[in-house]
Image (cartoon, rainbow, N blue to C red):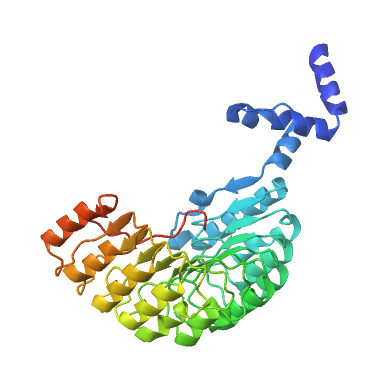
Amino acid sequence: MKGDQADQSFIMHLPEDCLFFIFEKIDSSVDRESFGLTCHRLLHIQNLSRKSLEFGGLFSRYNPSLSKTTSDADSFILDKLIKRFKQLELLSLCGCINLLDSGLSQLQNYGSKLKSLYLDCCFKVTDTGLASVAIGCQNLSFISLYRCSISDNGLELLAKSCLFLKDLNLEWCSLITDSGISYITNNCHELRAVKITHCEEIKGVGFEGCSQTLACLEADFCKLEPEGILGILSGGGLEYLNVSSLSWCIRGDGLRAIGGGFGKNLRILNFRLCRTVGDETIMEISKGCPLLKEWNLSLCTEIRLSGWESIGINCRNLERLHVSGCRHLCDRGLLALRNGCERLSVIYITRCQKVSSLAITLFKIARWDVDMKLEEVMCIMPKHFF
């Protein structure tokens, strides 16, 4: 008994930085979890050492008859956890479908260290909850608001407080307009990547004057306008752009601006399902984007021979090309690609009815170094974004 008391007395007299050092040297996850069971002081050290917390699965249940009770319980549990783990740098609440704005209120007091916050499918989180994030999490660099019920007002609060924001996911945030985007672009000068997929109220003009640091934009299924394309490109630093599935909302020549100079740093373009894109657009972009390495043109059904010839002549750095479902790609078009695009390593080609088996065989013989894949790929965003 006396030995145990002596050990506890010894621990109580060690400075906190020594205890932190001891904890950091523990490699085993089991031992780390057991560390705090020794005494209250070591539990305190363990709590302060925790940098990430993910518990979305706990909140994924949904029962309409218990909705209010469940929401109150969710907010109560989160409140306790945020108070306990005061040094969190990453917090994931993905799937917390019953979480209310009040559940985020403690972030005003304990969110100063937070750098990454995931609120995906937190359907009941509104501008009020985002205000708590803006007040308490001013060092935030990443936030995902997928399917949250936020508006331009919430983005304004976030933009004016979280000046170091780099990555922003607004996918399926249907209330956001270009006004909200302009708050972000005007205040967050380190912005690196943005997702606005299925944000139908965004036309693109809100990106006008964006920082040169903006390198990635996911804008598929959006109703972008030609002026919006110019706004998106205005920073001049864009490397990856996804504007797929625009066939029903933008004129084909609206994308020509990409080849007009502002898109000169583009490495990857996704035009999948842009059915109105024609040869003139393709020719302009192939000449104006010399660094292009990957181009998804699958189901771009209006590209004809002159477009394919322009790609073959001008896209000298192109490594991966997607042409599946391009109904006007013919043997002569494939020949143009074969004779050009000297750095091509992969071509995704299927459902091209005007391309004969002989043309494919000749392509394989002449360009044995190119992998012809009979498949279609939809997502080509580099993994280092999001």
Where residue 368 appears, x then y in whole percent?
A: 25, 50
Q: Is residue 77 visible?
A: no
- Tell me: 95 left or right of 277: right
- Tell me: 349 left or right of 130: left
Q: Residue at x 58, y 68 (%)?
A: 214
Q: Which quadrant is home to the N terminus? A: top right
32 or 237, which is in the foreground? 237
Q: Residue at x 79, y 16 (%)?
A: 4
Give the residue at the far right of this rendering.
13
373 or 23, which is in the foreground? 373
Q: How many marks?
A: 0
Q: Is residue 353 above or below residue 156?
A: above
Where residue 247 appears, x then y in whole percent?
A: 33, 80
Q: Residue at x 14, y 68 (%)?
A: 353
Q: Is residue 384 visible?
A: yes
Q: Is residue 133 above or below residue 202?
A: above
90 or 93, which is in the foreground? 90
210 or 219, which is in the foreground? 210
- Tell me: 275 left or right of 23: left
Where residue 54 appears, x then y in whole percent?
A: 56, 48
Quarter holding residue 297: bottom left
Q: Residue at x 67, y 42 (%)?
A: 50
